[in-house]
Image (tube, coloured by chain):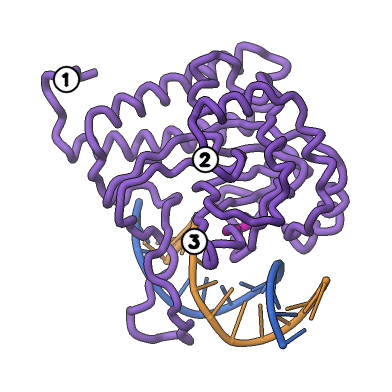
Chain colours: A purple, B blue, C orange
Amino acid sequence: MAPSSTRPDTPAIDTVAKEMGKICESAARLGVLLQPEIAGNPTVGAILEELQGSILRASALLNGLTGFDTDPGSPSFGNLREDSGKKRKIKSADAGDRRGGCRRRAHSSLILMNTVRAKTLDDGQTWRKYGQKQIQSSEHPRSYFRCTHKFDQNCMAQRQVQLAEDDPKTYVITYMGEHTCRDPTMVPHIISASGFKGTNLISFGNKSQTIRQIKAAVPASFAPRKQESDEEVVSNLTSASSSSEYLQLTEAEKPAVMTPSTGGDVTSDFQYSGDLDMDFMRVLDLDDDGFFS
DNA sequence: TATATTTGACCTTT
DNA sequence: AAAGGTCAAATATA
């Protein structure tokens, strides 16, 4: 693509960025859907890995080109509100209340986002469910969670949970933002949760490049509460060997049950150890107005 | 009583 | 207008 000599104008970059966001989204979903295929056919995994690598490189390239002062872009995430405390209005009212959709962030920051597959909703963090929505492209509703300490500690971590299309016993959990809270009740064993079971967690393959990217982003949800250098996180990630340790403790709290209709089945899964698989992750670089997703 | 979940309304973006 | 994300009243649970 264009080297440093000629720099594309901003609108062009915006467009590319938006498209990249869509590609990322699609690739992530594809990765989830193709999970079973990858086991039986390494070529599938290789292709996906290649795809992911290209996306990551392109993203990095794009980020290098501009600070991303773009339009709101993808509506997916980052809609963290600046205002709050407004009372609900019944039906029609003035337009003061700005709910839903995307809100802009005041300052540039790094929004971390990663998607994992898990048999349990208990990841050791304390979440508060604030919504559920039937999603067009999915048979299962999507649930929205924020950190319990959003207001008392201004912790902006969020997650979205959906049952996997290919396996209703598995959750697809998308984490957004970092936990900045320090909950004393927040399990020390969460630290062991950062122990993804090494290489084959990454569905797209084991290439060091991929792993490096993931290392950088994992702290979003699984790092020990105190942020440390990337290297520290890295060691947590790669050195840990079992996720079962973390899954043994699933009774610690009661997670919200998803669909009422399947609630019973799902609940029984909580005590059962399942794998925690990382499928895909992204680093979203936000600027004043835009975000890259 | 306090806290968490459910669920329809409401909001923004496309 | 549709889709997705969030709010908050009503309700459930500890």
Residue A35 among those drawn in magenta? no
Q: Mark 3 near mark 1, Cβ–Cβ under 8 Å? A: no
Mark 1, residue position = A4
* Nearest the eye: A201 or A195: A195
Which dot marks residue A154? 3
Judge from the rendering whether residue A170 lies leftward or rightward of residue A221; answer left or right. Answer: right
Assign the C terminus of chain A to one quadrant of the image.
top left
Q: Which quadrant of the structure image shows residue A129?
A: bottom right
Query: What is the chief secondary structure element of the magenta stretch?
Result: strand
Q: Residue A156 in the image: state x and y as whole percent.
A: 50, 56
**Can you see residue A199?**
yes
**Residue drawn at x 42%, y 70% as measured from the top left:** A99
The earlier-in-sequence mark between 3 and 2 is 3
The earlier-in-sequence mark between 3 and 1 is 1
Which dot marks residue A227? 2
Q: Three-letter amino acid code at disc 3? A: Asn
Q: Mark 3 near mark 2, Cβ–Cβ under 8 Å? A: no
Magenta span of residues: A142-146
Using a 10 Å C-alpha cutoff, classify the residue at mark 3 as few (fewer than 14 neighbours), some (14 to 19) or many (20 or more).
few
